[in-house]
Image (cartoon, grey):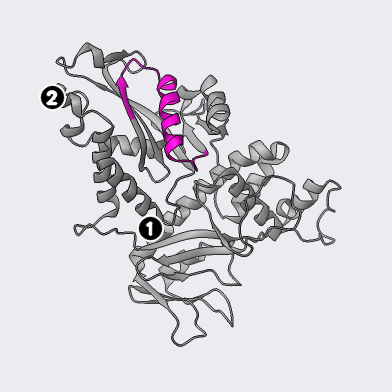
Amino acid sequence: MVREFHDRLRGRVREEAGRGAEPTAGVIDSQSVKADAVVGADSRGFDGGKLVNGRKRHVVVDTLGLLLGVMVTAADIGDRAAAKVLLERVTNAHHRLELVWADGGYTGSLVEHCLAGLALVLAIVKRSDDMRGFVVLPKRWIVERLFAHLMLSAYTRICSGRYKQRCSAPLAKTRALGVIRRRYGRGSGTLRRVIAMQPVLEIYTPDGFDLWPVAEIEPFDFLPLSGELSPAEVGTAVMRIAGCNDIDPDDDRPPRSADALGSFLHGLLTFDSLFAAGGLRVTNNSTGVTFVPGCCDGLEDWREWHRFVDEGSLLGFGHEPVSPLAERFGDTVRLTVNNEQTDSPMIELSATELRHLLAGAERDLTDFLALAADWTSRHLPGRCGPVTAALARVLDLPVPTEPLEP
């Protein structure tokens, strides 16, 4: 029952955070903890890397840090051996999972095993040689945060023999429920994330596009950008951003390349000012009202929201017949879906809440950019650097400095 309740609540939290109920990406890691002397030899071991005699917890989380799978072993069980079992369980339970990030302890044959046997990309995030001391690495901090939550209470500590039988997947699921409650819940049990903000890209796929794999998405629908997109969805986003800038060069820019790929990417790689149709979408999950980007909006201008919330000036996103408008009255922000209608639906929230939403949207864009950098290294190896730099410019973000290795 705990497992079913946890999984249902996780799906609801993901949906109210603007994600799909089922994840497409996750993070795997392990944690060894010293065991008390009364813990039997049959359930403990020595982790030579961490110099810990005890037990080891192996977990997979989604990109929100919510638990997808857990397995507890003796501490002497290798990460790769346990990962083969755990990742098979997780992929069987979550069929949309296509990408999992891991540290250097999961390299080797496990990468090929995941790709061939589980249709799962295992991307290794490594520290660079010049890093010293504690450094927050892309994706890996997400699972470390869960470990911190799991170790908050003596009730969950593996090292106590009194809780030997409780050191299990159900225990981790129970504790993970507390993580969800602290991060998303109120005392009444309702979720905090009533209003969600997502960076979205308006999608249009040219007929006959075959330069790389893309997903099937309804024309002029919006694709939310985050670190959870599938490879085909990332390809769709890159295709659309490049397509928005696929304009014949004028006399001030070099001519198009003769090959089809170079010609399609020409505008993305040569324009000084880039454009990406879309913007920030705000949804009130309790009322169903959605504030969508207007015809004059673009993802490259998403930081205008910060100027709006700080200075309080009007922020318009289009013109008739549909004219979304953002206004600030003191500490209250009003988002009008269509200012051309006197009875238009609206979303109201505090300026503080909007700042929190903007921080979350920036994390989503940063995660997407890291995912896109990995995607370009696989699908556009000869143009990975320039394309990634162009995507960073259009999203107004720094270029990722920590490459993901397949």
Q: Quadrant of the image for the C terminus?
A: top right
> What percent of the width, then of the height, locates residue 183?
29, 50
* Residue of label 2: 162
Dot 1: within a 10 Å radius of its alpha carbon, few (fewer than 14), some, or many (20 or more) residues? many
Q: Is residue 108 visible?
A: no
| Residue located 36% across and 68% down the image | 351
| Residue located 37% across and 59% down the image | 356
| Residue located 67% across and 52% down the image | 239
Magenta range is 71-98
Residue 395 shown left or right of residue 42 in the figure = right
The number of callouts visible is 2
* Residue of label 1: 16
> What percent of the width, then of the height, locates residue 192?
30, 59
| Quadrant position of residue 344 | bottom left
Is residue 73 inside the magenta stretch? yes
| Quadrant position of residue 311 | bottom left
Q: Quadrant of the image for the N terminus?
A: top left
Secondary structure type for disc 1: helix
126 is higher (above) or lower (below) than 22: above
Residues at circles 2 and 1 in contact by the CB criterion of under 8 Å: no
- Please tell me which of labels 2 and 1 falls first in the chain: 1
Residue 91 shown left or right of residue 158 in the figure = right
Q: Is residue 14 visible?
A: yes
In front here: 332 or 203?
A: 203
